[in-house]
Image (cartoon, rainbow, N blue to C red):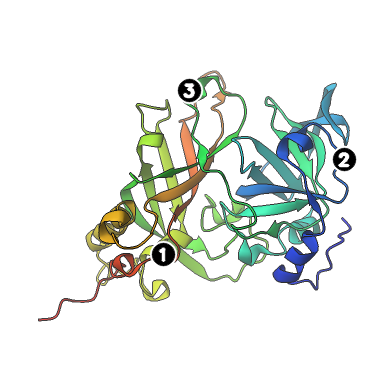
């Protein structure tokens, strides 16, 4: 895979070079428009290492999404990535054939995390995923992380009301000021890579190519809010795991040892996280004289359930990959709630 972005370019220089490429909309890209000298903004949602051969239906050409009739392809891959349209709920997939391609794609991994918008340079359509209309795309260039001022999700795409009838993988991105985290657990031995944010189910499946070998601890919880409630959707649970979020709610994250039962209080940690979440939900009350926006922005994806061996159906689960406060930086009213709180003066 030949790249027009030299490996010597740092993220700042890569973003400057990417500015020379014209933006193409997601709908124009899906319509098969020529993508030479173009870039497509997408939200990085999820990645994993190779587990089993990938099956897809090959396109008739690089400029159309019409698949060959019954032309089913199967290929082994090194890394698999899901990316969503920041302006809708549509999702595309991309895979790398080998370790070299993976290293090019994830070159700027220190600035990319689930929920981050990236520029895909000169994307191409390879086909569609099997049993869905999700496009399979390709690029010869690295994912270029872009600032929020360049492109940000609309945050008005809610999860589908009824996922029983869905066949495509889809994403969601919305804002809420009624977030609640349930069954909060500090989880240890997670990957320290920004790119996966500790969200890989098993270390052997982690998408990160460059690893320090250092383990991190993160927060795992079930996400509750009206936008994900059982009254509105037909799913069963929404899970969330993140090292990044744990760092946000912790003071001196790298010195905390959740595995030390004698020095770590689970109840105090849970109480602190809930207080922080409640404070951010209601910033207009704690910061009445400021212009701090209250609430959170949530990004995630879901995959339709599959019938396996005609005996059971997968549990419906929405994968929440990013939860970020709308306010940045955090005001003092939030910072003072970080765990562990200082001991009260006697």
Left or right: where does residue 61 sit relative to residue 39? right
User: Residue 265 at x, y = what percent?
Assistant: 24, 65
Residue in the image at 39% along x and 27% along y = 232
- Between the residue at mark 2 and the residue at mark 3, the CA separation in whole angstroms equals 35 Å
Residue 40 visible in the current orientation? yes
Which tag, 2 or 3, sits closer to the chain's start?
2
User: Residue 85 at x, y = what percent?
Assistant: 64, 41
Left or right: where does residue 84 sit relative to residue 258? right
| Image quadrant in which you'd find residue 268 | bottom left
Asked if labels 3 and 2 touch by Cβ distance under 8 angstroms, the answer is no
Which label belongs to residue 162? 3
- Between the residue at mark 3 and the residue at mark 1, the CA separation in whole angstroms equals 33 Å
Label 2 sits on residue = 34
Residue 188 visible in the current orientation? no
Of the 4 image quadrants, the one containing the C terminus is bottom left
Which label belongs to residue 248? 1
Q: Nearer the viewer, residue 147 or 187?
A: 147
């Amino acid at each position: 895979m030949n790249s027009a972005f030299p490996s010597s370019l740092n993220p700042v220089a890569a973003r400057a070079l990417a500015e020379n490429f014209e933006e193409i909309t997601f709908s124009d890209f899906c319509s098969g428009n020529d993508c030479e000298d173009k870039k497509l903004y997408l939200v990085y949602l999820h990645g994993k290492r190779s587990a089993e051969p990938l099956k897809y239906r090959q396109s008739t050409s690089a400029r159309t999404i019409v698949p060959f009739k019954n032309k089913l392809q199967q290929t082994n891959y090194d890394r698999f990535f899901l990316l969503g349209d920041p302006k809708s709920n549509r999702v595309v997939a991309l895979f790398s054939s080998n370790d070299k391609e993976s290293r090019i794609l994830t070159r700027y991994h220190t600035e990319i995390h689930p929920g981050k918008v990236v520029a895909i340079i000169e994307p191409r359509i390879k086909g569609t995923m099997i049993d869905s209309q999700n496009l399979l795309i390709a690029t010869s260039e690295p994912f270029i992380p872009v600032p929020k001022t360049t492109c940000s999700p609309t945050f008005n795409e809610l999860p589908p009301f009824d996922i029983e009838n869905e066949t495509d993988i889809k994403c969601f991105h919305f804002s809420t000021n009624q977030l609640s985290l349930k069954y909060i657990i500090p989880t240890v031995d997670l990957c320290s890579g920004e790119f996966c944010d500790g969200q890989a189910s098993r270390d052997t499946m982690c998408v990160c190519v460059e690893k320090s070998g250092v383990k991190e601890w993160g927060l795992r919880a079930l996400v509750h809010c009206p936008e994900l409630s059982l009254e509105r959707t037909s799913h069963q649970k929404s899970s969330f795991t993140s090292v990044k979020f744990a760092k946000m709610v912790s003071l001196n994250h790298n010195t905390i040892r959740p595995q030390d039962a004698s020095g770590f209080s689970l109840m105090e940690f849970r109480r602190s996280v809930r207080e922080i979440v409640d404070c951010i939900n209601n910033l207009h009350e704690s910061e009445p004289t400021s212009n701090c926006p209250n609430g959170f922005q949530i990004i995630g994806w879901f995959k339709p359930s599959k019938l396996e061996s005609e005996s059971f159906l997968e549990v419906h689960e929405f994968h929440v990959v990013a939860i970020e406060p709308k306010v940045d930086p955090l005001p003092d009213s939030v910072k003072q709630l970080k765990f562990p709180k200082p001991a009260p003066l006697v």
